[in-house]
Amino acid sequence: MPVPKRKRSRARRDSRFANKGMAVATITQCAQCSASIMPHQACKECGFYKGRKVLRTKTERLVVRNSVRKKRVESTRKKERLEAKAQRATQE
């Protein structure tokens, strides 16, 4: 009967079973937008988790940012118009 020549170390022995517990990750679909998500995670597409809105999505941030920029541009244009009007009044 064959006999091992050397004792197998614990690390070498246990490394055989290191990957035994690995499993394929499950992927579910978001109830709101049907995007693929990991279970128990908030959806990155719509920002919902368990039927509640918990995240601001990128598109929502863009909408808010654009509206703020529009207001800022309008206010600066308004100031420029008022300044130009004041200059015309002082010239006359």
Image (cartoon, helix red, strand yellow):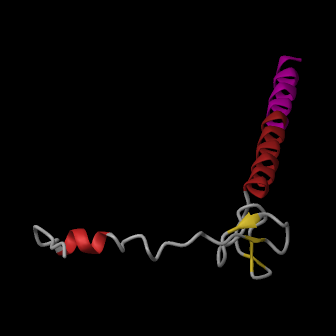
Q: Which residues are magenta?
A: 78-92
Q: Is residue 6 magenta?
A: no
Q: Tell me where residue 78 sits by quadrant.
A: top right
Task: Identify whether 91 is placed above or below 32.
Answer: above
Main secondary structure found in the magenta portion: helix
Q: Residue furthest front?
A: 1
51 on left or right of 14 = right
Tell me the quarter of the image containing the N terminus: bottom left
- Image spot of residue 25 (x, y percent): 60, 70
| Closer to the camera in the image, 8 or 80 | 8
Tell me the quarter of the image containing the C terminus: top right
- Image spot of residue 17 (x, y percent): 36, 74
How many dots with numbers?
A: 0
| Closer to the camera in the image, 46 or 78 | 46
Q: Residue sitting at 67 percent across and 76 percent down?
A: 39
Q: Residue sitting at 72 percent across and 64 percent down?
A: 56
- Image spot of residue 59 (x, y percent): 78, 53
- Image spot of residue 21 (x, y percent): 46, 77
11 on left or right of 45 = left
| Closer to the camera in the image, 80 or 83 | 80
